[in-house]
Amino acid sequence: MDLKELQSKEPELIDVQLLFDDEGRSASGFKVVGANSKQYQEADRAWKLMNVRKSARRGRGIDGATDTGAAELVDLIAKREMAICVACVVEIYGFTNEGQPAPLGEETLKAIFAARPTWRTKTAFAVESEQVFTQG
């Protein structure tokens, strides 16, 4: 691939299909950008900065060998995953709110992911999978 093309190429959207109609066609889902996207890089950096500041204020690391420390690490991982997913979803389709198309936004996405936690995992996998960058 030519470097100039690589630098100027817009990231391709990845279709995360979540619900299907009776004929097996995607009825609801997300369009996301991948880990090389500006959205991902900015969310990841913000998350890392916040955690470095938090750790510096705390003056200690998290002890993953304790139940409390392990639970804290698991919660941090889930919160980072949520932040990445919210930043990388650039379109939703097939979702309504009281009969109207659901708006794309943090509240909508958090409500969807709260109702279906496995969809966050599926979305995070699509965003971070290197496989999606070799398609095309």
Image (cartoon, helix red, strand yellow):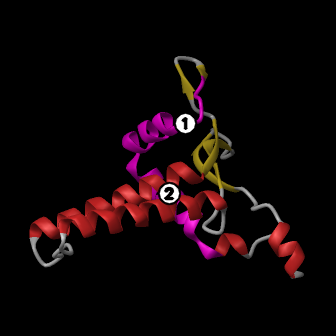
How many numbered dots are placed on residues in this image?
2
Residue 14, by quadrant, is: bottom right
* Secondary structure type for disc 1: loop
Whole-number angstrom distance, CA of label 1 to CA of label 2:
13 Å
Q: Which residue is mark 1?
A: 105
Residue name at image x 58 percent, y 32 percent = 95
Where residue 81 appears, x then y in whole percent?
43, 59
Which mark identifies residue 65?
A: none
Amino acid bearing label 2: Ile
What secondary structure do most residues of the magenta stretch adopt? helix
The crowd level at tag 1 (other Cα within 10 Å; few <14, some 14-19, many 20+) is some
**Residue 62's x, y, as percent?**
19, 72
Residue 47 is situated, as x and y percent measured from the top left of the image, at 43, 61
- Quadrant housing residue 6: bottom right
Tell me if 55 is positioned left or right of 89 in this view. Answer: left
In which image quadrant can residue 12 be found? bottom right
Q: Which of the two labelled residues, at mark 1 and mark 2, occupies the earlier sequence position? A: 2
> Is 117 situated above or below 64?
above
Q: x%, y% of residue 100?
A: 60, 19
Quadrant of image for the C terminus: bottom right
- Other residues around mark 2 within 10 Å, as few (<14) / some (14–19) / many (≥20): many
Residue 26 vs 54, above or below: the answer is above
Residue at mark 2: 84
| Magenta stretch bounds | 101-130
Residue found at x 58% / y 71%? 129
Amino acid of disc 1: Gly
Tell me, yes or no, whether the highlighted magenta stretch contains residue 110: yes
